Image (cartoon, rainbow, N blue to C red):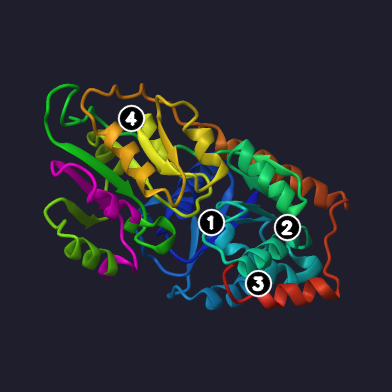
């Protein structure tokens, strides 16, 4: 029994989770499936990634509690065959929907978009995160991770059997891009960061590292977010205004990656950072913190880049200094995985729907599960 009608949801098409979702929707539509998308608001840098044919319901706000409260009723009206939860941030909405709809709730498949263990958590919050993940079998029918290492971590944390399906690949630059300095040319040296200006990404680390690099090394951070004022103030205080720029979102980030000497990602935590794969796909080396088990899977060889500890500023500086050296060879482009991701997701959806129809995947809420779901229902997962 196929999952003919897929329903998914997001607050806005604004981050990596939503960008990957946008690329997936087109693949599902191309395979003849009906797709419903519930959006809080038509905004974000990836709002144009929603392909024609997707039935979109707009709520007119980006309020987490508002979308969570509306979701069960919208699901009941749409009557999809399956619900897809696109990332960790949205799993509380899935739990609330399962609780409200009970046995009439369609099967729910979720993607683990962030690391099971986050580097920024206080021990108390880390304990809460573990408790939350352990409850996932009470409202999810299946879980997906994007690499084997993140799948192993997710399986340990949740007790679920976890499928490994990478995100669909992003588009590469349409034409060859001038990378600036060629080896030995002595030209300008440029570092690129790509991601939301939010605490998770720790762009403050990268800006601080710039004070320890030669004055001809420049940095551009592409993205937007709540920390723009704080990061701008840091740049001004450190006297880096002529070397560090934050122009906002870029229409063609892979082209900017191809033009940089190195891409840097200094995050506290990540799931499977697509920007690393995008940079390597255009032959740009990467420097990243050990923010997820997936990082070392992607940067699997020293010729591709460097992985440093999250709080090792000296290590970050040394890695950046190495890769902006014009005599260091750039890696050969690494093809992105995930060309068949849409098809693999559909195979998983079909299997889950068939299992539910056969009556072997009933999932209910006991009294303790109800209390847990209510606790997390109107807020993001920790």
Q: Nearer the viewer, mark 4 or mark 1?
A: 1
- Quadrant location, the C terminus: bottom right
Q: Are marks 4 and 1 in contact (CB under 8 Å)?
A: no
Q: Residue at x 36, y 61 (%)?
A: 44
| Mark 3 vs 2, N-terminal side | 3
Give percent across and percent down for residue 232: 22, 65
Q: Which residue is mark 4?
A: 282
Q: Judging from the image, what secondary structure is the residue with disc 3 in?
A: helix
Q: Are marks 2 and 1 in contact (CB under 8 Å)?
A: no
What is the count of numbered marks?
4
Q: Spatial distance from mark 2 to mark 1, Cα to Cα? A: 25 Å
Q: Residue furthest front?
A: 314
Looking at the rendering, which quadrant does residue 245 occupy?
bottom left
- Looking at the picture, tell me which residue is in the foreground, 374 or 357: 374
Q: Nearer the viewer, mark 3 or mark 2?
A: 2
- Looking at the picture, tell me which residue is in the foreground, 257 or 66: 257
Q: Which residue is mark 1?
A: 119
Q: Judging from the image, what secondary structure is the residue with disc 1 in?
A: loop
The residue stretch that appears in magenta: 205-229
Q: Which residue is mark 3?
A: 72
Does residue 328 sit above or below 377 in this rendering?
A: above
Q: Residue at x 72, y 65 (%)?
A: 131
Does residue 183 sit above or below 155 in this rendering?
A: above
| Mark 1 vs 3, N-terminal side | 3
Q: Spatial distance from mark 1 to mark 3, Cα to Cα? A: 33 Å
Give percent across and percent down for residue 193: 31, 47
Q: Which residue is mark 2?
A: 140
Could you classify mark 2 by the number of other residues whose Cα lies within 10 Å: few (under 14), some (14-19), or many (20 or more)? many
Give percent across and percent down for residue 162: 71, 44
Q: Judging from the image, what secondary structure is the residue with disc 2 in?
A: loop
Q: Judging from the image, what secondary structure is the residue with disc 4 in?
A: loop
| Mark 4 vs 2, N-terminal side | 2
């Amino acid at each position: 029994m196929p999952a003919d009608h897929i329903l998914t949801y997001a607050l806005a098409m604004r981050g990596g989770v939503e960008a990957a979702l946008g690329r997936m929707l087109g693949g599902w539509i191309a395979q003849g499936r009906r797709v419903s998308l519930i959006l809080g608001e038509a905004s974000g840098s990836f709002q144009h990634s929603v392909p024609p044919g997707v039935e979109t319901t707009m709520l007119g706000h980006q309020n987490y509690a508002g979308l969570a409260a509306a979701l069960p009723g919208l699901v009941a009206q749409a009557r999809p065959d399956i619900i897809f939860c696109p990332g960790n941030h949205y799993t509380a909405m899935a739990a609330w929907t399962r609780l409200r709809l009970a046995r009439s709730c369609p099967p729910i498949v979720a993607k683990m978009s962030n690391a099971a263990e986050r580097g920024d958590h206080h021990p108390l919050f880390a304990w809460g995160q573990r408790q939350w993940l352990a409850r996932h079998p009470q409202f999810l029918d299946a879980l997906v991770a994007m690499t084997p290492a993140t799948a192993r971590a997710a399986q340990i944390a949740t007790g679920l059997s976890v499928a490994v399906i990478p995100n669909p690949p992003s588009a590469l630059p349409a034409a060859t891009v001038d990378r600036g300095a060629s080896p030995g040319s002595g030209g300008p040296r440029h570092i690129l960061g790509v991601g939301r200006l939010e605490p998770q990404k720790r762009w403050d680390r990268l800006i601080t590292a710039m004070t320890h690099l030669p004055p001809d090394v420049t940095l551009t951070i592409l993205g937007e977010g709540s920390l723009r004022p704080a990061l701008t103030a840091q740049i001004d205080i450190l006297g880096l205004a002529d070397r560090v720029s934050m122009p906002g979102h870029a229409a063609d980030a892979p082209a900017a990656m191809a033009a940089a000497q190195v891409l840097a990602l200094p995050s506290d935590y990540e799931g499977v950072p697509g920007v690393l794969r995008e940079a390597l796909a255009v032959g740009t080396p990467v420097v990243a913190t050990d923010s997820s088990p997936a990082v070392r899977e992607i940067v699997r060889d020293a010729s591709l880049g460097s992985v440093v500890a999250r709080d090792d500023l000296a290590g970050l500086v040394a890695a950046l200094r190495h890769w902006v050296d014009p005599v260091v060879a750039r890696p050969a482009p690494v093809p992105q995985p995930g060309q068949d991701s849409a098809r693999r997701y559909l195979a998983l959806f079909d299997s889950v729907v068939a299992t539910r129809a056969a009556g072997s995947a009933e999932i209910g809420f006991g009294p303790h599960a109800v209390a847990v779901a209510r606790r997390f229902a109107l807020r993001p997962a920790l």
